[in-house]
Amino acid sequence: MSATNTRVPFTPDADGDCPVREVLDRVGDKWSVSIVVLLGRRTHRFTELHRAIDGISQRMLTLTLRALVRDGLVSRTAHASVPPRVDYELTDLGRTLLVPLIALDEWASTHRDDIRAARQRHDQDAAAG
Amino acid sequence: MSATNTRVPFTPDADGDCPVREVLDRVGDKWSVSIVVLLGRRTHRFTELHRAIDGISQRMLTLTLRALVRDGLVSRTAHASVPPRVDYELTDLGRTLLVPLIALDEWASTHRDDIRAARQRHDQDAAAG
DNA sequence: CGGGATCCGGTGCGATACTG
DNA sequence: CAGTATCGCACCGGATCCCG
């Protein structure tokens, strides 16, 4: 796609908003990605997600899910039963996000060692002065 | 995309580290993306970046550049001249990151209206309810 | 010009306790 | 089970001043 050279990504549009920022504000925060990927595999309940995502607090799970639902990436289905049951799953929109997310993951996996090596090199240089 | 079902992205490896997290910690913060994209177009000096990126403070530019250099995504070249001149440019590694970043940007551009619509729908429902 | 050091306010986020 | 409400701190990030 030669448009890469003509169009400037990540640039604010006429409204003064940058479309990537809206996405990265969601993707960038610590937990959204984990949730989206987990839901990409199957529907999860609240406590299932809580257990599956190591280290997340119940508060952050609530807030992150709420934001994902608001953005139309995740759907929330509450069943009126006792005990209550709430299912979270990806919307069609959420599923499309999975694609670039996995591309990013593959980049990360591929170059993880490069980054670590660069980091160690840099830190050693700093220590050596 | 049957790979989605077999490999599990974003999962901690044997070391207990999640490769995506290292990337997203860098990509996710407010300024790294802008810097990487700008440097993807050409080499920039410090003040050029400062002017080009609207709203960034000098402190954050310094800190973000330092982190990018540490991760081996950006190279820093100081010229011993008067007045001093420092050039920042993408490393080869940094240039490869540009690819998935642009993929994400295209997703954002494509679905920006969907997200906005979902958001407005959600907020109206909340106001009504 | 290209930063470093410091102060400081906002808020992200965890821990805890309570609710339907 | 699936949340809500409150407190408290850590840290992000902006503003300001200083230096080589």
Image: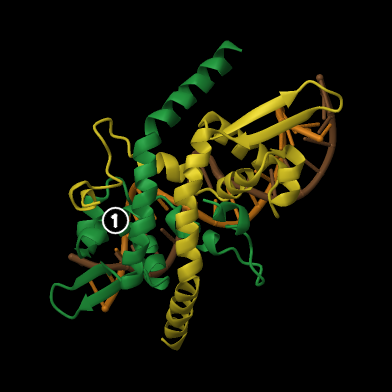
Chain colours: A yellow, B green, C brown, D orange
D2 w.r.t. B85: above or below: above
Residue appearing at x 60%, y 45% in the figure: A40
Q: Which residue is mark 1?
A: B37
The x and y percentages for residue B59 are: 36, 58
Residue appearing at x 47%, y 84% in the figure: A124
Residue B99 appears in view: yes
Q: Amino acid at mark 1?
A: Val
Q: Give me the chain letter of mark 1.
A: B
Nearest the eye: A64 or A81: A81
Which picture quadrant has residue B67?
bottom left
Q: Is residue A7 left or right of residue A110?
A: left
The x and y percentages for residue B117 are: 43, 24
C12 w.r.t. A81: above or below: below
User: Looking at the image, which residue sits at the far bottom?
Assistant: A128
Q: Is residue A69 left or right of residue D1?
A: left
The x and y percentages for residue A77 are: 68, 27
User: Looking at the image, which residue sits at the far top?
Assistant: B128
Nearest the eye: B85 or D15: B85
Which picture quadrant has residue B49?
bottom left
Residue B32 appears in view: no
Residue appearing at x 14%, y 72% in the figure: B83
Q: Is residue B39 left or right of residue B83?
A: right
Nearest the eye: A97 or D5: A97
Q: How many marks?
A: 1
Nearest the eye: D2 or B106: B106
Residue appearing at x 26%, y 60% in the figure: B40
Which quarter of the figure is the C terminus of chain B placed in?
A: top right
